[in-house]
Image (cartoon, helix red, strand yellow):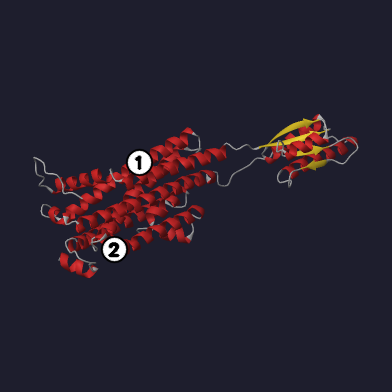
Amino acid sequence: MTAPAHSDVTPNTPAQLVRLVAGREISTRIRDKGFLVGSAVLIVLILGMLGFQVAINSGSDTTRIAVVGGSSAVTEALRAQGDALGTDVEVVPYDDEASARTAVKDGDVDAALLSPAGRQPELLVENDGGQTEPLVQGAVQGMAISQQLADAGVQLASPPQVDVVALDPDADADLEAAVVALVGVVVLYSLLILFGQFVAQGVVEEKSSRVVELLLATMRPWQLLAGKIVGLGLLGLAQMLVIAVIGIAGALTFDVVSLPGRLVGTVITVIAWFVLGYAFYASVFAAAASLVSRQEDLGSVITPASLLLVVGFVISIQAAQDPTGSLSTVTSFIPGLSPLVMPVRQAAGGAAWWEVVVSVVLMLISIAVIVRVGGRIYSGALLRTGGKVKLREALRAER
């Protein structure tokens, strides 16, 4: 990593120094192959999910039934039974049993109903009847009962319509929003891991190449740390926004979601939690990375933070299924876990507004503490090279 280029106007204020470091981080990482490949993979992942959802939604709900020797009454009975079961029925007439059997074997129809005069009706299927059997069975039985009543001279009145009252009319919308939030959390988790490692790798690179000594000759450690976090944070936020725009545009274009407003609100919530999560984890990764001077030792110091992210991601999956459960509720208040769990609970309608406020406040407090303590570790360990620095030694050196 090269030192920052000199300009005609030498930065002398803390804001200018932080901006200089932030710009250097952005320009360096935006040309990094790992960043470009990771971005491409996430975009392909989102597009793949959209394509999969479109393929599922485009699947046909029509049941094709071949009928041999049936009258128009059979056709009407089958269609009526299909309407009752929530599926469209397409009746295909065949002249003989042999052609109907061939159609079933070839997959041209789902089943074949043989109802020649004077014989017991038969249903031909390839393997098992599945949903077709109760559909045909109900239609045939209904016809038989109607015929018996007609022969007995009984005239039935039209049956009453049942009014459906949903006890939870927003359940489907909550489930849809939870799925969107879960996809967003996958992206959020990936970006937190990716940019946390970028921060850690940058710190170790500067220590091992002694570039940090040149940088600290013109700025304080906290300015270097702030610039690094801000620069990579802006880059991560830009990447998150690009992915969000692609995802929202794709979902609306292909009509994947039924409530566009709910979709946009959920995406904004995930992005807001990304900002909080990044501020927390970037400080942790930077402080941890400052304790070592070689890339080979980096994994040992950032593993605890990485495992915390993994735990949060696993719990977020569980929260999508049970947003009001004890595990998801408790962990949505724990700093470090809340950026991954709370967005899913919010989207699923399992979090009250005051719970979100408390979780955000706790996260802000923890970020302030982590930045302060992490900054002290970073300052105390940054110039100590040659091996792994103990946490106590870093804090003592900073004093």
Question: Residue visible at 48% across and 40% down?
Answer: 50
Q: Residues within 10 Å of mark 1 (few under 14, many from 20)?
A: some
* Residue 287 at x, y percent in the picture: 25, 60
Question: Considering depth in this image, is 371 or 213 the residue closer to the camera?
Answer: 213
Decide if residue 247 is on the left or right side of residue 121: left
Question: Considering depth in this image, is 109 or 118 the residue closer to the camera?
Answer: 109
Decide if residue 294 is on the left or right side of residue 154: left
In terms of secondary structure, where does tag 2 sit? helix
Decide if residue 254 is on the left or right side of residue 365: right
Q: Disc 2, disc 1: CB below 8 Å?
A: no
Whether 344 is drawn above or below 147: the answer is: below
Question: Residue visible at 20% across and 58% down?
Answer: 207
* Residue 108 at x, y percent in the picture: 71, 35
* Residue 83 at x, y percent in the picture: 69, 36
Question: Considering depth in this image, is 342 or 305 the residue closer to the camera?
Answer: 305
Instruction: Give the position of the C terminus as an image quadrant.
Output: bottom left
Residue type at tag 2:
Asp
Question: Considering depth in this image, is 49 or 188 the residue closer to the camera?
Answer: 49
Q: Would you identify the image quadrant in which residue 79 lies?
A: top right
Question: Residue visible at 74% across and 39% down?
Answer: 104
The residue that disc 1 covers is 241
Give the CA distance from mark 2 to mark 1: 33 Å
Residue type at tag 1:
Leu
The residue that disc 2 covers is 297
